[in-house]
Image (tube, rainbow, N blue to C red):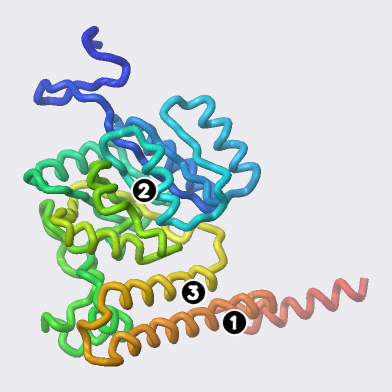
Amino acid sequence: MDPSLGPDDKRVDSGVITAPSVSVVIVTFYTGPLLWRSVHAALEQSSVKEVIVVDNGNWPATVSALVDMAALEPKMKLVTGQGNIGFAAGCNLGARAAEGQEIFILNPDAIVPAGAVDILLEEGRAAANGAPWMIGGRLINPDGTEQAGARRRTLTPWTALVEMTRLDRLAPRHPYFRRFNSHETPCPGKTIQMPVISGACMLMPRMDYFAIGGMDEGYFLHAEDIDFCLRFRADGGRVLYTPKADILHMKSSSRANKVKVERLKAQSLNRYFRRHYPTQYPLGFVSFVCGLVWVGFGLRALKSVGGSALALLGVNRRHGFGGLGRAIRAARRTNNR
């Protein structure tokens, strides 16, 4: 090792000596085993100065293990005791505790491969051209396919209507009927500007994060990243997407109540539309779209509750009512003993 380098320094190919400068912020709510994989993968990144875990809610054993880990791992910080304050507020809380030059918002069920943060930093700095910037990578499913959310258009009431009703199927090539999510379109071969990236993987200079006040804490869950990207661009920043860094995103690892999550999502979308598009559309259109959002929530809630009720009765999609029959026979055998 070069004796001129400190313990936190690294030498890059250009010969320039730099120190790890990235503060990773992971907001967790009853995440489960994936949390440990996410934290360890982030700690192993050469550009990472620290990993800040914001405990919005976890089992006591998990919190105890996080406390022990933070005591032993000098690069880890634990922010706990505030309760579940929401994802946006949790991100802001972690960012305020950060000491790095860059903030990397990372979901607790996202696994960053070796060298990915280096790539994001390099691509973001190169494409910024002096402007405020943030960058996200390519989110992938466990089977290697591209995941929805990493590259998206600006969310408007109209694009939401197209997405919810799949009007794009009527005229797939018409620009007015393009979907909000772009993951089904050919992936760009280089780093490009993108209207919206995902809050599951979002890196930017710390000063740029706070230049627009951080995340809007009026969003408890969902849509806060969409809102953040919109405000960031309106303030002159560049939102970037690169296909050069793949991040494995498992999704839906939290043990949160699904109906509550869907309700919070509907509330956030309603807030977003009414805040950013109060007068741009014909009278009643925004209210119509917001109503459809609530209808969608109701249908998903019924499906979730109905599925849970059938599961309790021993019915599932694969086995149908055969499972119910087996459950009844098992109960009879138990009563006859």
Name which quarter of the figure residue 251 lies in: bottom left
Q: Residue at x 32, y 60 (%)?
A: 225
On the question of residue 55 being in view, the answer is yes
Q: Are marks 2 and 1 in contact (CB under 8 Å)?
A: no
Query: Percent x, y for residue 283?
Result: 26, 92
- Total marks shown come to 3
Q: Are marks 1 and 3 in contact (CB under 8 Å)?
A: no
Classify mark 3: residues with Cα within 10 Å, few (<14), some (14-19) or many (20+). Answer: some
Q: Which residue is mark 2?
A: 106
Q: Which residue is mark 3?
A: 263
Does 264 sit left or right of 187 as displayed?
right
Give the answer, above or below, for where 230 lies relative to 5: below
Q: Which residue is mark 1?
A: 306
Q: Residue at x 11, y 55 (%)?
A: 192
Indicate which label's residue lies in the foreground, 2 or 1.
2
**Secondary structure found at label 1:** helix
Q: Quadrant of the N terminus?
A: top left
Q: Residue furthest right?
A: 337
Q: Marks 2/3: CA distance? A: 23 Å
